[in-house]
Amino acid sequence: MDDLKYCPKCGEKTLIWDGERKWTCGACDFVLYNNIAAAVAVVIRCGDEILFTKRNQMPKKGKLDLAGGFVDPEESAEEACVRELFEELQLHLQPSDLKYLGSFPNTYLYKEIDYRTLDLFYEYNVSEKFAVSLEISEISEILWIPLKEINPDDLAFDSQKHFFQHLYR
């Protein structure tokens, strides 16, 4: 993050990164905060099995992931869940079908930049497992894995590892 040197307000090469939260311009006192991004992850559960996707793109290509993604501006977390489940899996659901479970911080490395996120976890229960017709892009396959067989080392993101180790057993 300390590669950012030029102030977006005055254009001077005087931005100073504090190492954690903000850049400050010594020339014009401009402050740029490194706020976190909100992201959602949906635990799709059928009995004791959880639906995982296998990532087909970086970061963490080939690792297991939960359906979800970033929350868009002017969108609630629940609306993001509904949108992401439709985009990724062609599932239609209502926000009321979701149960909020908790949150964990995460770092999402994309093109050499660390994006700090707060990942909000939701649960969506289904009565029977289903197949998905994937357009291979972000996801290469889906897998139903029994909860007791989830290996945190196979998961793409630290927030999901912490979620399954500490919150969702």
Image (cartoon, rainbow, N blue to C red):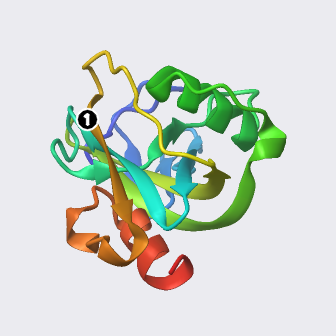
Q: Left of 145 or right of it: where is 71? A: right
Q: Quadrant of residue 147?
A: bottom left
Residue at the far front in the pictured view: 128
State left or right for residue 166 relative to residue 151.
right
Q: Quadrant of residue 37?
A: top right
- The answer to whether residue 19 is above or below residue 140 is below
Residue 19 visible within the image: no
Q: Is residue 26 above or below residue 149?
A: above
Residue extending furthest toward the right: 96
Residue found 61% across the figure and 66% down from its top? 103
Tell me which residue sits at (64%, 56%) in the image.
123
Q: How many marks?
A: 1
Residue occupying image coordinates x 38% and y 42%: 14
Expressed as whole percent of the image width and height from the top left, the position of residue 48 reads 49, 68
Q: Is residue 147 visible?
A: yes
Tell me the kind of residue under disc 1: Glu
Q: Residue furthest top?
A: 135
Q: What residue is shown with label 1?
A: 141
Compared across the picture, whether 107 is left or right of 154 comes to right
